[in-house]
Amino acid sequence: MPSDYGYINARIRGQHSHLLKPVAYEELLALPGYQPLEKWMESSPYSKQWQLAKARYHGIEALEWSLEKNFCQATELLLKIAEGQPRDLITIILRRWDLSNLIAVARGIHGSWSSVEILKSILPAGGISEVKLQELANQPDMAGLTDTLYTWGDDFHQPFKHALEEYQKEKGLAPVELELYKYYYSWVFKKLPLWGDDSASLKVLFQREIDILNAKALKRLKEKKDLAAESIPKYYIPGGTLLTKEWFIKYFDRKEGPKVLSSLKGTRYYEYLFRPGRDLKSEEKLEQEHFRELSRRYQGNPLGIDLALGFLWQKYYEVINLRLLARGKFYGITGDQIRDQLLLW
């Protein structure tokens, strides 16, 4: 019901008013080092978490923890003030961080990282708590991670279980990450039809995410010299609008491939796929365009989920930007170099 959003969006507007403006970033970029940034934290919107962080950590580790804690508390507040349909939709959005965290934990276990290193790469803003993520990070292998999720009754154990045999055979993470993405988006699209206009708005954004993942897969697979034709279909993630599974496969055919590429003219993906070789800048551009689209949703329907969606992503990238800025100041990188890495909307 639209009335469900009146109170929620009023609270979100209050939170949104504390986000940093472009002029604030310029002031931070002009700071003469890392120590002045710590002083800024004392009177910033992150001051409460900063005081807690200093009692547990030191230096840049304390600053990064306070940023992440602040974001997680912002997501907790959204869930606390929301009920019914708004809460269900916010939960779907936040489950995206569970997906990211599980991929990070899987990569850490695969790479034999310590649990401490793994936990540095997570942001516990979803339904899997920091304590549980720590337990997952302590697992000795992928089978242990799978069993732990199953014990908790978390449905994310399913994609791990499906990928386990192939992972053990290939000794690579691709099967695991693919199954996680496929499971998550399948789950999302089963949930979304339960809610009218809001679900349609969210569906478009999830479809764009899938399109980006499929485009990146096409680019990556095109560079593989030993790519077996029969293995191509498994890399396709269904649910996007860019390509059907049939066209995804035809992209690798000598005759049909150019037709598939030509069909993408006028889209953001054509230039990316047209350029040969791995192009990290173009890849980054795709993701940045999607982020800006998510952030602009804050200006969308004032009686729907758009404000929550836009606020979450603006808040998330504020944390990412401040983390980049802090690391840059800590390691003596110039303000101009740091500015090039920031993503502003």
Image (tube, helix red, strand yellow):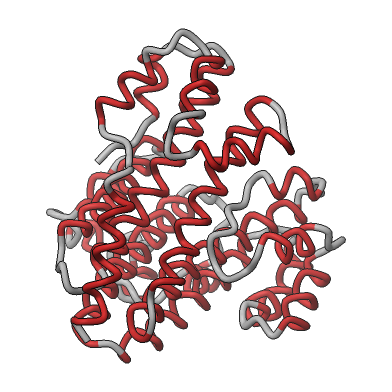
Left or right of 264 on screen, residue 188: right
132 to 110, vertically: above or below: below
Position of residue 42 in the picture relative to residue 133 (left or right) = left
In front of the other: 233 or 343: 343
Position of residue 285 measured from the top left corner of the image (x, y, whole percent): 31, 41
Judge from the rendering whether residue 130 lies leftward or rightward of residue 184; answer left or right.
right
Q: Nearer the viewer, residue 191 or 182?
A: 191
Residue 330 visible in the displayed image: yes
* Left or right: residue 60 compared with residue 253: right
Residue at figure coordinates x 37%, y 86% from the top left: 84
Residue at the far top in the pictured view: 32
Image quadrant containing the C terminus: top left
Relative depth, front residue between 306 and 107: 306
- The x, y position of residue 50, in whole percent, is 58, 36
Compared to residue 136, the image places residue 5 above or below, namely below
Residue in view at x 55 percent, y 46 percent: 68
Q: Count the marks: how many? A: 0
Whether residue 241 is visible = no
Q: Residue furthest right?
A: 140
Tell me the residue at 36%/68% (across/down).
248
User: In the rendered image of this protein, does residue 306 appear above or below residue 191?
Assistant: above
The quadrant holding residue 78 is bottom left
Pinpoint residue 64: horizontal percent, then vertical percent: 58, 36
Q: Position of residue 63 (x, y in %)?
A: 59, 33
| Residue at the image position 68 percent from the left and 54 percent from the top | 107
Q: Is the N terminus in the top left, top right, bottom left or bottom right quadrant?
A: bottom left
Relative to 220, residue 210 above or below: below
